[in-house]
Image: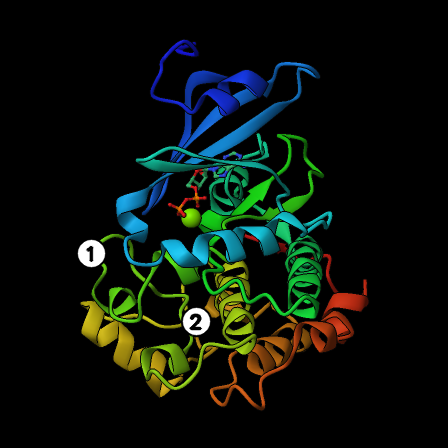
Amino acid sequence: DDDDSSKYPSALRAKYTIHEKTLGVGSFAVVKECSDRSTGEKCAVKIILKKVIAGKEHMLDTELGILQKVRHEHIVSLHDIYESPEAVYIVTDLCTGGELFQRIVERGTYTEATAADLVRQMLEGLAYLHSQDIVHRDIKPENLLFKTPAENAELLITDFGLSKLLKNDHQILTTACGTPGYVAPEVLEGTGHGKPVDMWSVGVIMYTLLSGFTPFYGEDQNELFASIIKGQYDFDDENWDEISVEAKNLIDRLLTKDPAKRITAEEALKDVWITSEENKGINIA
Ligand code: ADP
Ligand code: MG
């Protein structure tokens, strides 16, 4: 452990031991493991260099103040926030179970019921965030983490709310890192960025969970964006043959191009595919 390093704020070092272990690297941050000195509880600390929020420092206190109040079983809780001249340090719950798709790839086969359970957990977290008027804006598999390595571990949403600080409207179109295949058409068209954008992303994830491939694609970013803006996808691949009509109906309601007509998180939680346990025993390869 490099806890003696003076690069961390002293208030952070007073409460937490920072471990060498890097848990992940995102587009804007490095995430390290740490532990609470008094309780021994292991946490994650997300280190965001201030240069990536340049010009938006004034939003920091407000945004982080809001995020600090968020408490939900499917949302990664924020414990503490520290600042140094160079960086912001955000201490959160630790998730040791890995990212969503990583686990699914490792497992190889699962049922439609398992997929429904995962989508339900995302929807519960989002319904809560939306009830607090928080839009995540960056729902994608890398931001969905399992709490523990256990088979039935809870799925948690991370990285929420910060996108307002970290991204400007141009960056999303020009970012070189990662393909923004989960972004809603109205974001690309610059006409909307409200709660429905999160529901679109759930639709892309649900489609991908069930079929193993994404609904929209392109040879390059321009083609991908054109495909998303067109909003046309299909269930033609044979992978879809065994998938229930109920699943396809919910995907259609999530991937509805008009954000005003798109299903909300509350409505989706009442959808028959989410609530019904029937016809979900089929293994997905
Ligand atoms: P960014 O905003 O830069 O994308 P993230 O918060 O998404 O950063 O974190 C980047 C990666 O770090 C995640 O994809 C994940 O693998 C890992 N990570 C983030 N938060 C946690 C956490 N609470 N527990 C464990 N790993 C985490
Ligand atoms: Mg992330």
Among the 4 quarters of the image, the one containing residue 35: top right
Q: Residue at x 47, y 65 (%)?
A: 137
Task: Identify the amino acid type marked 2.
Answer: Asp
Using a 10 Å C-alpha cutoff, classify the residue at mark 1 as few (fewer than 14 neighbours), some (14 to 19) or many (20 or more). Answer: few
Among the 4 quarters of the image, the one containing residue 48: top left
Q: Which mark is residue 237?
A: 2
Task: Identify the amino acid type marked 1.
Answer: Ala
Q: Which residue is mark 1?
A: 176
User: Viewed as shown, does residue 183 lie left or right of 242?
Assistant: left
Question: In terms of sequence position, does the residue under pointer 1 or pointer 2 come before the other?
Answer: 1
User: In this picture, is 147 found above or below 43?
Assistant: below
Q: Residue at x 38, y 33 (%)?
A: 84
Q: Residue at x 55, y 71 (%)?
A: 241
* Whole-percent x, y for residue 273 in the image: 73, 70
Q: Residue at x 66, y 15 (%)?
A: 40
Note whether residue 160 is visible.
no
**Colouring style:** rainbow
Secondary structure beneath dot 2 equals loop
> Quadrant where the N terminus lies?
top left
Secondary structure beneath dot 1 equals loop
User: In this picture, is 116 found above or below 142?
Assistant: below
Looking at this view, is 78 or 246 the one in front? 78
User: In this picture, is 144 found above or below 239?
Assistant: above
* Whole-percent x, y for residue 282 in the image: 67, 58
Note whether residue 195 is visible.
yes
User: In this picture, is 91 found above or below 272?
Assistant: above
